[in-house]
Each structure stands twice: as structure tokens, then as C-alpha cells.
Amino acid sequence: DTEVTQTPKHLVMGMTNKKSLKCEQHMGHRAMYWYKQKAKKPPELMFVYSYEKLSINESVPSRFSPECPNSSLLNLHLHALQPEDSALYLCASSQGDGYSTDTQYFGPGTRLTVL
Amino acid sequence: AQSVAQPEDQVNVAEGNPLTVKCTYSVSGNPYLFWYVQYPNRGLQFLLKYITGDNLVKGSYGFEAEFNKSQTSFHLKKPSALVSDSALYFCAALSPRGWGKLQFGAGTQVVVTP
């Protein structure tokens, strides 16, 4: 089963709010990823976790804060976002260590709207 | 620099006709190549990938892709398109030294008409 789940499906927040996105996989994958996707555009990599440690940060603003509490769970904490941060946020996981060439499997995404 | 090109923003095809979505790449070394499909308001679904070996790769939902090293292409094909194949298709490449960073093409919208 190649399933990655994400909650919530939709999120509307104000610029002063603090919220979190959650991603979960039970495939035993060792790498987890956060992507940001604007409408009709390809996903843009934000963060990569390998064995629960942050291995890649693509110069993402500090108002996005990732967290990997355990090997199955990945969170993205949001604070003081801007309207331009509105997008579909995708989580993915892969079997290898994040530096490998394994297939990345994506979750359904969280549609974020910042007012 | 690595890049993946999908030259067509949109491909229109009648149901039952063959479908081809084009992809070319410029990646150092021997890249791993992927195709993903995205339905509206959904995540990306993995279709197939090429690592090495046979140049024709078979994937999910009747899709296949042909790897051509001399033309640096990896075109996605389906012999007979369905209306339900209407979606956004992404080609992606991963360099063996790419630290897991997928390089995506811009995407091609496929519209299959009844």
C-alpha cells in the first residue's frame, strides 16, 4: 500500500494565526518531503527529512517550520504567513534515505488559503 | 544545470485515439526518469519510472513510456485514451547525485474528449 495521508484537506488562516499541517505514512519509508504547489505549476521542494533529521532546506522562509516527531509523521508548522503562501502543500515519502533515487509517493495535499 | 522540458502546455485527443505526452531532459549522468499524473485538487500519482535496462517502461493504468538516450527523451504513451485520463501530467528527473531532488517539467494538461 503506497498511501500517504495529509490533514487537514483544506485550511483557511489569517496572517497572524498559527496552524500546523500533518502528514503520515506507514510504509516504513525513511525519507519524507514537503512541497509547495501553485495552481497548474509543478511542485517546488521545501524540505527533506532523512531518518527523522532535516537534510535539505530549500531556503524556505522561517515562517514555515518543519518537524519530524517520528519516522511515520511529518508536520509543517505555519506562523505569520502571507497571502502569497496560499497553495497546495504536498507531502511525499520514499523508501530510501532522501539521497536515493527511490520513487517518491505523494499525499493528496492540504489546500491552504491565507487571508 | 538540470532541466526537464515538456514542450506542450496542453494535448487534446479524442477518446480511443493514441495519447502521447512529450518530455525531454538535460540531466548529468544517467538520470532516473518519472511520470506522475495529477487530477484536480489531488496529489501526484506515480505512473512509472525508468532506471536502466529496457527502453520501454510499462506503468499503471495502461500507460507506458519510451526512453531514448540519443534524443534525451522520455515520452509518455497510451494506445487508447479514455476521458478519465484527462489530467495534468508531470515528467520528472532525478540525478543519481541529485540528493533526492526531483526536477519537474512544467506539466502538460491532457484533455480527452468523448
Image (tube, coloured by chain):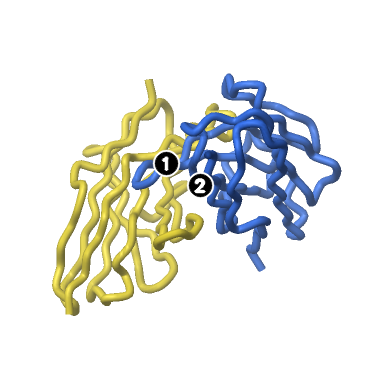
Chain colours: A blue, B yellow
Q: Is the residue under label 1 in contact with that under label 2 (CB below 8 Å)?
A: yes
B97 lies above or below B19: above
Relative image position of residue B12 (x, y in whole percent): 15, 62
* Quadrant in the rendering for residue B26: top left
Image coordinates for residue B93, horizontal then vertical, percent: 42, 39
Q: Residue at x 63, y 24 (%)?
A: A57
Q: Residue furthest right?
A: A70
Image position, residue B49 (x, y; %): 45, 53
Give the Cα separation between the discs numbered 2 and 1: 6 Å
Query: Which chain contains the residue that carries disc 1?
Result: A
Question: What number is the disc on residue A88?
Answer: 2
In the image, residue B16 sits, relative to residue B60, either above or below, namely below
Identify which amino acid the numbered label 1 is placed on: Lys
Q: Secondary structure at mark 2?
A: strand
The residue depicted at 34 percent of the width and 47 percent of the height is: A40
User: Looking at the image, which is closer to me, A38 or B44?
Assistant: A38
Q: Residue sitting at 31 percent across and 46 percent down? A: B107
- In this view, the residue in front, A75 or A10, is A10
The numbered mark at residue A38 is 1
Secondary element type, mark 1: loop
Name the residue rendered at 56%, 53% in the picture: A109
In front here: B48 or A46? Answer: A46
Q: Is residue A74 left or right of residue B16?
A: right
Q: Looking at numbered disc 2 in the image, what kind of residue is underneath it?
A: Leu
Question: Residue A101 placed where, x, y %?
Answer: 57, 41
